[in-house]
Image: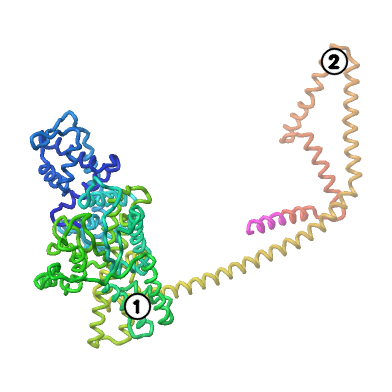
Amino acid sequence: MFDNRYNNNNLVSSLAVFRELYDQKKDIYDVLGQFINTIIIEDGLFSISSTEITSKLKLKYEFIIPDAVVKTTLRRLPFLKREHGVFVVDRSFLNSDDKIKEIQTDFQSDTEFIIDALCDYISKIEKKELNKNEIDNITENFYNFLIDNGTTGKYIKYISSFLLVENNSDFSNVIRTIREGLILYTGINYYDINHLGYWNSPLEIYIDTEIIFHMVGYNGSIYKSYFDDFFNYVKEINIKNKKDIIILKYFESTKKEIESFFNKACDILVGKGTLNPKSTAMNSIVTGCKRESDIIMKKADLYNILNINKINEDANIDIVREKNIFNNDIIQKLSQEFGYDVYEDLLLLNNISIRRGPEGKKTNSEVNSILLTGNSKIIKLAWHPLIKSDGSWPLATTLDWMTNKFWFKLNKGFGQDAIPHNTDIIIKSKIVLSSIISDSIEKKYEELKDEINKGNLTKEQAQSRILVLRSHARRPEEIDQNIETIIDFLNQEDLEKYAKEQDSLKKNIIETEHQNKVLLEKIEENNKEINLRKENEEKTKQELLNSKQIIKNSMENVYNKNLKNGERKIFLFKLFHHSLLIILSILIGLFLFSFNTDKIDRWAIIIGIAPYFIAYILSCLFNHKINPFAFYKNIINRMKKETVTKNGFDIDAFEKIKYEISLLEEEINSST
């Protein structure tokens, strides 16, 4: 978490640069050295001190780096030599290739492009042009969202929904780089980076009810994956140390809360209570249960999971007055600032402070205990200046924060399987939007209970509105691309009006579905009629084809019979024709051989030309081309026709019916 000491715009681009350089150099000191190299070149420095560099890292890049880390980095740089308490620059060793400015400019351009698209998205939803002040607020909310610096801004719901709707790989790559840079940067502030790769200091982590429910999956698969990332690191650390140096526990108050939760589940099951629409965990418990014994079995399963994983209750609280972190003055101030009585939440933080001992605000790996919570109110209290001093570990933190610290300390790197799920901006967007929905449901549910207590609602009206609220409850993994309905629900202040609008919408949908159903039924009827008509037409065509086939076959038999009877006449004609040609050829040959050799050539030419000359004269006389072969064929066909039609056979009718049959066959084949 960051405070107002940061210029978020500059910090975001600097985090991206940090991540990019880490990929190239693989060593945090080398990355910081590149930043220092750029500072020296840009500012024209010839000598520097660690204090001066620390200040310039904050001024130029918004990095607040521990002085010890800066000093170690300076001692390792080849272009610096320590003389008389300062570091003198040997400019011949400076790297003039300024990658930082180039990378920073590229990422600033990329983030500005994303923000422009985000503003367009919000403008369309709110149906108005955004003014400069609104754009500035959106930008600030967006940067806070990226660096885990709060998710309570006015536009956070739009930012989450925008990232889910877009789900743009280019956007995701830019944001992932920034968030991975954030893990590296925050790690520098909490650990000695000379000793990465292992964890050897004892730590007691107290988990609250929400974290336990994450563990067993009551809050959904995404929250369970978050817990699994964290718990896998815990197990890895304990295995490397060959003993359990990190121990998970829970307070007596947490056990009481769990017992109360399951008792409430029993009441809901038997009708003595109402299921809060916000509580996905309660819904998980009562789902599938038919008897109270089923719920008791689920509770037993939960405690069994805790025992198997060596997570036990710690009820030994030694309350010593001087170890208390709060007094009446602090309680009053914080209650007034946060708008609710913070006493119960401060009790949990006080328990951790007592565990830490007289120096309860120890820093970094010296801390021996911490509270892991899913309660955002406790987190805000733990980071409040009245509770947490600069540079100290908070008394309470989140799964994300603790997981990232383990990741950094174990030096896991950015391999595909090494990166925690919490760096995924899509998963974060779903979690944030799910949380906003839950808060909205809780607020509307409290208002609804007030209306019921005042007698302003009938039982039926109350049940109807509770059902509306329950229908909008979403686990993170249940939030899909259909974001518009969620945004409409979040933007609707009047639940009664919203319920009526939803009822009206449902009625319209039902009416539309009914009309569509009637229309589909009519279309189906028309299609059936068309198909039936088509089937009848096909059937008629087939019957007609069959009858014509019968007629054709009958006529074909008569045709073949008549043709067979006339075959002798045609044969005799062909014999006469071919014999005549042979005799004529012999006579021409004899005629030619009766002359001497000189005259044979002359007569051969005359006889060869004569047929063509005769054909040409006849063509001119009768005004059409003379083809002997066609002439011969026509005579044969005419003889066949005369033979076939001799007994009254209608050859034209025969040809017509064959043509009609071919047309019918084409129509039938084309329709199938």
What residue is pinned by disc 2? 600
The local crowd at label 1, few if under 14, some if 14 to 19, many if 20 or more residues have their Cα within 10 Å, is some
Quadrant location of the C terminus in the rendered image = bottom right
Which residue is found at the position 55% from the left and 70% from the top? 526
In this image, 433 relative to 631: left or right? Answer: left
Residue 565: where, in percent of width, then height? Answer: 90, 49
> Could you say which disc has been placed on residue 649 in the image?
none
Residue at image position (19%, 30%) is 93
Q: Is residue 291 visible?
A: yes
Label 1 sits on a secondary structure element that is helix
Image quadrant of residue 616?
top right
Instruction: State the residue in front, 490 or 389.
Output: 389
Tell me residue 169's x, y (percent).
Answer: 34, 51
Q: Where residue 133 sits in the image (x, y, percent)? A: 15, 58
Residue 413 point in image, percent of width and height = 32, 47
Quadrant of the image containing the N terminus? bottom left
Viewed as shown, does residue 19 lie left or right of 305?
Answer: left
Magenta stretch, main secondary structure, is helix
User: Is residue 161 depicted above or below 7 in this figure?
Assistant: below
- Would you say the residues marked 1 and 2 are in contact, meaning their CB atoms lie under 8 Å apart? no
Kindly identify which residue carries mark 1.
262
Which residues lie in the magenta part? 660-672
> What residue type is disc 1 on?
Phe
At 62% from the left and 65% from the top, the residue drawn is 534
